Image (spheres, helix red, strand yellow):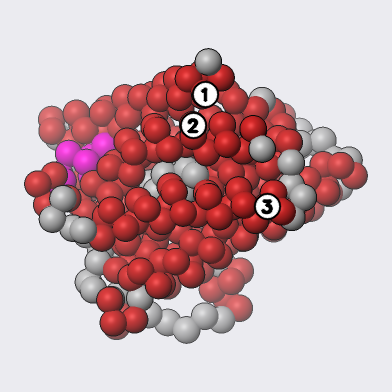
Amino acid sequence: MYFLSNVFTAFNQVVILFLVAMVGFFCQKTGIYTEKASRLTTDLLFYIVTPAVIIRSFVSIDYNPEALKGLLAAIAGGAFFHLVAILLSEAFFGGKRTTENSGIFKFGSVYGNVGYMALPLALAVLGDEGVFYCSVILVPFNILSFTHGVRVMQKKGERTSFGIKNLIANPGVIGVALGLPLFLAGVELPEVIYAPVSYLADLNTPLAMVMFGTYLACADWKRLFSEKAVFSVALIKIIIVPAVTIAVLKLAGFGGTLFTACVLSAAAPTANNTVMFSAKYGRDTALASKLTAFISVLSIVTMPVMIAVSQSI
């Protein structure tokens, strides 16, 4: 019964997200809000909404030594499974295997729907403590996606070498730089500041999913199954990476809600950012949309399994 309960919770969350995406699908088909408009909205989501989400997650948490210890452990756990995924993505899609779409496959293998799926699922399964840890995992997610992720998505002729600007001037790092000191100092933002930040953060899931729906409406689904690499991405993202995370973090002494939150985040399906980064850097958004949708559907089964395993060992 416990396993079936987790299946039902995950299934409900995926259905909710897909219903929001269907609004975007409808908007594209009727011309109300099109894929072209979605591309123009990408920077709003990247540079305004993303930092707002991170800042709100930090100022919503009461500072204490245990919270700080858990924060650091969650960052370490999140960094670990992202680095594992990066290594696997290079092994599967790098070197001589590099193709025009390798950037999409690498990004899709590494970055999961932590903000849009893991957080709501953590609230349903683990409560507020789980949301805290999953929010903290957005730190390595954002730092890596706006550095390594940008690198793999940029086309060969457009790539630039990393410098201090690349590491600092991105929405993920800016959000952390603003939010972390507030958390450490125990600052409670006045309502006149907190409310606008919260309103912007609330745009995160609906805006991303509506944009995703417009890309989905333009996708050629017949082409999906001709891309064998899609199945490799699924294998890495929702099976190998969470399985390795379970094994290694358990050996490292992780347990309880922290452990399950890390596993849940590692098991999240390919991030919607795969589509948004594809749009921003001129990649194949149709392929990215289909990849994200396909792995999201598979995760209805795989996420509850990983959650159940993490809570039973």
Q: How many marks?
A: 3
| Marks 2 and 1, the one that precedes in the sequence | 1
Say whether marks 2 and 3 touch (CB < 8 Å).
no
Amino acid found under the numbered disc labelled 2? Pro
Q: Please tell me the numbered disc located at residue 249.
A: 3
- Disc 3 residue crowd, few under 14, some 14–19, many 20+, Cα 10 Å: some
| Residue sitting at x 56%, y 40% | 264
Q: Please tell me the numbered disc located at residue 304.
A: 2
Disc 2 to disc 3, C-alpha distance: 18 Å
Say whether marks 2 and 1 touch (CB < 8 Å).
yes
| Marks 2 and 3, the one that precedes in the sequence | 3
Q: Position of residue 111 (x, y in %)?
A: 46, 54
- Disc 1 residue crowd, few under 14, some 14–19, many 20+, Cα 10 Å: few
Magenta span contains residue 229: no
Tell me if 7 is positioned left or right of 185 in this view: left
Disc 2 to disc 1, C-alpha distance: 7 Å
Disc 3 to disc 1, C-alpha distance: 22 Å
Say whether marks 3 and 1 touch (CB < 8 Å).
no
| Residue sitting at x 26%, y 37% | 213
Q: Which residues are magenta?
A: 212-220
User: Which one is in front, 175 or 304?
Assistant: 304
Q: Considering the numbered disc 1 on the image, is that residue within a helix, a strand or a loop?
A: helix
Q: Considering the numbered disc 3 on the image, is that residue within a helix, a strand or a loop?
A: helix
Q: Considering the numbered disc 2 on the image, is that residue within a helix, a strand or a loop?
A: helix
Amino acid found under the numbered disc labelled 3? Leu
In the picture of the structure, the residue carrying the numbered disc 1 is 3
Tell me if 113 is positioned left or right of 51 in this view: left
Q: Position of residue 195 (x, y in %)?
A: 64, 31
Amino acid found under the numbered disc labelled 1? Phe
Q: Please tell me the numbered disc located at residue 67.
A: none
Of circles 2 and 1, which is in front? 1
| Residue sitting at x 49%, y 34% | 305
